[in-house]
Amino acid sequence: MSRLKIWLEQTMMISFAILVGIILEGLVYCIIDGAPLASFSLSWLQLLSVVLTGALCSIPTVFWLKNLECSKKQFIVRIILHCLGLYVVVSLFGLVFKWFTQISGFIMMTVIFFMVYIFVWIVTLWFYKREDSRINKALEEIRDEE
Amino acid sequence: MKVLFEKVDSKEEEQAVIKAVEVTDEISGAIELLEGDAKSFAVSKDGKVYIIKASAVYYIESVDKKTFVYTKAGCYDTKYRLYELEVMLDGYFMRCSKSMIVNLKKVRNVKSQMSGRIDATLLNDETVVISRGYVKEVKRRLGIG
């Protein structure tokens, strides 16, 4: 898979996950405040910030995928660094684009971030599993008999 | 392209005739695929030289500038470099990492690891690693890419 394709795929996946997270956050606030759900809205700047965050967060992933083969210990270290690196990026974007104005908003964003991170991993692993299944099916047709 | 199949009674009578305007990549691939089993090359073990059929090979590995060929019967070394064998064998033989060529016909199954690498279990229960970068080519060779 070309790097550009991986980058676009990751951008779409992360942007979508962040958007779902923000919408859920908005709905939770609406319910807590007792405001009508229709009062929740997103500005074009917020949508743009979501796509920009997705695009930026995808860059380390593209390079991450380039040299993935490593030991289990290295893999754990890399995944922690990757997660924390993205958390810093998302937090900075949140601050700049005013996704949160209070500490409660920041905590909510942190929860959403880790949910999104786990979601992206689950989807990626699902893609791998589906790919394995397709390859194994094709291998069955050409396999030598022993 | 129209494909005809005619049943024959013995292995000696088996042949394939391809009639085409020109030799395209697909036709070259088909020729290489059909010739695959007939290909053989020299290997050595304990000072003795053997000729082995390509179809007997599980995988080929390059270690410290030496090339080792693995079959069900054991491990042999060969004078050929990995890139030469890659050209010679082709078909279902493909590079799965910088230092290895695997025979896809000898792969029992593949399993992706969380780290991104793919473990391929061979028919002799050995496991070789397919680098993520070669997955696209694996799928292309298998006709699913």
Image: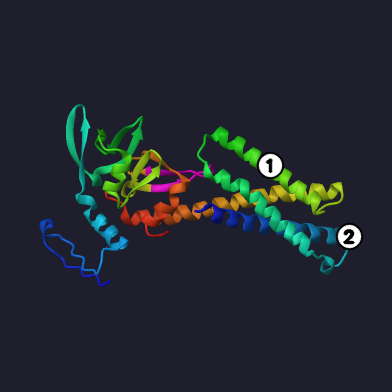
Q: What SS does tag 1 mark?
A: helix
Left or right: A84 in relation to B23: right
In whole angstroms, how far apart are the C-alphas of marks 2 and 1?
A: 33 Å
Q: Which residues are magenta?
A: B109-121
Q: What is the chief secondary structure element of the magenta stretch? A: strand
* Residue occupying the far front of the picture: B22
Task: Examine the structure image and report whether residue B11 is included in the region drawn in magenta.
Answer: no
x and y, in percent, of residue A124 in the image: 57, 52
Within the image, what quadrant is residue B33 found in? bottom left
Q: Callout 2, which amino acid? A: Asp
Tell me the tag on residue A85.
1
A10, above or below B74, in the image: below
Within the image, what quadrant is residue A73 found in? top right
Residue under label 2? A33
Can the viewer see residue A110 in this picture? no
x and y, in percent, of residue B103 in the image: 32, 46
The chain letter under disc 2 is: A
x and y, in percent, of residue A15 in the image: 67, 57
**Of callouts 2 and 1, the N-terminal one:** 2
Residue at 67 percent of width and 54 percent of height:
A54
Q: Callout 1, which amino acid? A: Gly
B29, above or below B134, in the image: below
Residue at 59 percent of width and 53 percent of height:
A7
The chain letter under disc 1 is: A
